[in-house]
Amino acid sequence: MTDDATQRAATLLKEHRESIDRLDAILVYTLGERFKHTQAVGKLKAEHDLPPSDPAREAIQIARLEDLAVKADLDPEFAKAFLAFIIREVIHHHEKLKA
């Protein structure tokens, strides 16, 4: 590669990495906000003796996320696995609040 091409590649790489870093920050802050709401839901469930898990809602959410993933050109299996992980964490938090 020529020096010009190498420099262009380095610039593009830097720009992609900066975008990735911004998106990672957005993901972390978004997950933080999501967990604030799921913690509030967990407290409500604990106060009203509701079960920590809602399999019907979870199934709807997984199907909805799978559809969103397809529309976003994201592997739907990855999206389902990611949401399943989040749901497990939320249920774990709800179970701790109920105890």
Image: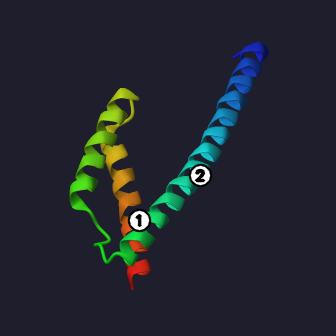
Q: Quadrant of residue 13?
A: top right
Asked if residue 52 lies left or right of residue 37, the reply is left
Residue 28 is labelled as 2
Q: Is residue 5 left or right of residue 69?
A: right
Quarter of image, res 15: top right
Q: Nearer the viewer, residue 49 or 92?
A: 49
> What's the residue at 41%, 58% (across, down)?
86
Residue occupying the point 49% across, 58% down? 37
For disc 1, the marked residue is 90
Quarter of image, res 23:
top right
Circle 2 SS class = helix
Which residue is painted at 26% across and 62% down in the image? 54
Distance from the alpha carbon under mark 2 to that under mark 1 = 16 Å
Check disc 1: other Cα within 10 Å, few if <14, some if 14-19, many if 20+: many
Numbered disc in front, either 2 or 1: 1
Q: x and y percent of residue 88 in the render? A: 36, 65
Left or right of 61, for residue 31: right
